[in-house]
Amino acid sequence: MERGNLLEIARNTLQIEIDSLQKLKESLDDNFVRAVELILSARKIIVTGIGKSGIIGRKIAGTFLSIGLPCVFMHSVDALHGDIGIVSEGDLAILLSKSGSTEELVQLVPFLKNRGAKIISIVGNEHSFLAKESDVTILARVEREACPLNIVPTSSAMVALAVGDALAACIMKVKNLTIEDFARQHPLGQLGRNIILRVEDVMHKNDNLPLIHPENTFREAVIEITNKKLGCVCVVENGNKLVGLITDGDVRRALQKFENIDKLKVEDVMTPNPITIHYSALLGEALSLMEQRESQINVLPVVDENNVCIGVIRLHDIVRSSI
């Protein structure tokens, strides 16, 4: 098969899924609002499904947990072999099923009700058993699956996942969830560190800070870079206000450009007005500033409100913060 044909198949697959999401967007109604209200009032949330719906359910449960909701995933098969013991009065069960008539879920419904749990179903058939027996039904119907055989759960899985994401986003908004709230659920991951730790927590400062003045010689700048071992030197004047930066890369370029470096001054080699970051910025901001550029940088001078250089942070320092 030609490469062009493969690309066409891929684009057609994505277009079918895009169309399915667009139809989901247009079909949302008051049932979705009621589902948000049930989630917010629930003592505990139990998400369940089987097959691909179960995989999507695990992701939804994980998302809910990450925003601070008390939520667990319960395998549909294991539920009636003891796991349903986790369900109690005031809980909410979210059932995922494309057909709305998955046997394992249908068998589960009366036992959930007997335990006093409310039920939200996310299904593709509004006339199905689950749709009729649930307290709230969110219709996640698709016209066709995106696979060539119209059988592999592709569009339907994408739509169910999108419903879960939309529920989570609404809950975050209603609860006024902040970055700090989110970080409490992710204290050990790089994500958590990026939104908890600040530049001042990991930057090099005081005696470890490499500093030089514009009128100093290039040789003195190289010595300062070597002694402080941070791969750079900050060029300052008038009370340590930052005016430039010399990195290892600048040193190599200077050696290539100039035959005689004896008379070179710092101001001849430095990058004037370099990119900086405030000491109170989050690590994630520093990481983005370094990486989201056409030419990636590995070091940032750290300044205060008056552009006084008070530190240096390297990409390595951010990575090392996870060790």
Image (tube, grey):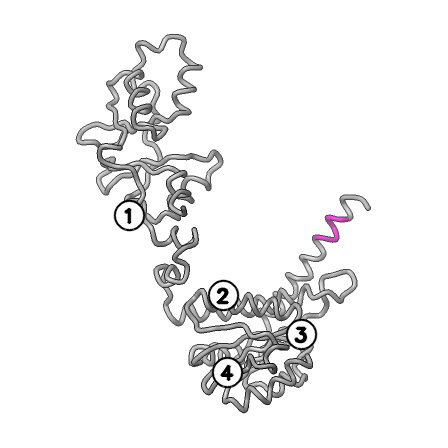
Residue at position x 26%, y 32% from top? Answer: 209
In the rendering, which numbered label is found on residue 280?
Answer: 1
User: Which type of secondary structure does the marked residue at label 1 adopt?
Assistant: loop
Which of the two discs, 1 and 2, labels the residue nearer the N terminus? 2
Q: Does label 3 or label 4 sit earlier along the sequence?
A: 4
Where does label 4 land, which residue? Answer: 87
60 is within the stretch colored magenta: no
Marks 3/1 in contact by CB < 8 Å: the verdict is no
What distance separates the C-alpha of mark 1 from that of mark 2?
Answer: 29 Å
Which of the two marks, 2 or 3, is nearer to us in this view?
A: 2
Residue hosting label 3? 98
Q: Position of residue 165 (x, y in %)?
A: 52, 66
Which amino acid lies under the numbered mark 4 shown in the image of this protein? Val
Gap in Å between the C-alphas at discs 3 and 1?
A: 48 Å
Residue 136 in the image: state x and y as whole percent. Answer: 55, 83
In the depicted structure, whether residue 114 falls above or below residue 149: below
**Tag 1: residue type?**
Ser
How many C-alpha atoms fall within 10 Å of the one at disc 3: few (<14), some, or many (≥20)?
many
Mark 2, Cα crowd under 10 Å, few <14 / some 14-19 / many 20+, is: some
User: Secondary structure under badge 3?
Assistant: loop
Circle nearer the N terminus (2, 3) = 2
Instruction: Residue 177: give x, y in percent of width and height.
Output: 38, 66
Residue type beneath disc 2: Thr
| Image location (x, y in percent) of residue 53 | 63, 70
Q: Which residue is mark 2?
A: 63
Q: Residues within 10 Å of mark 4 (few under 14, many from 20)?
A: many
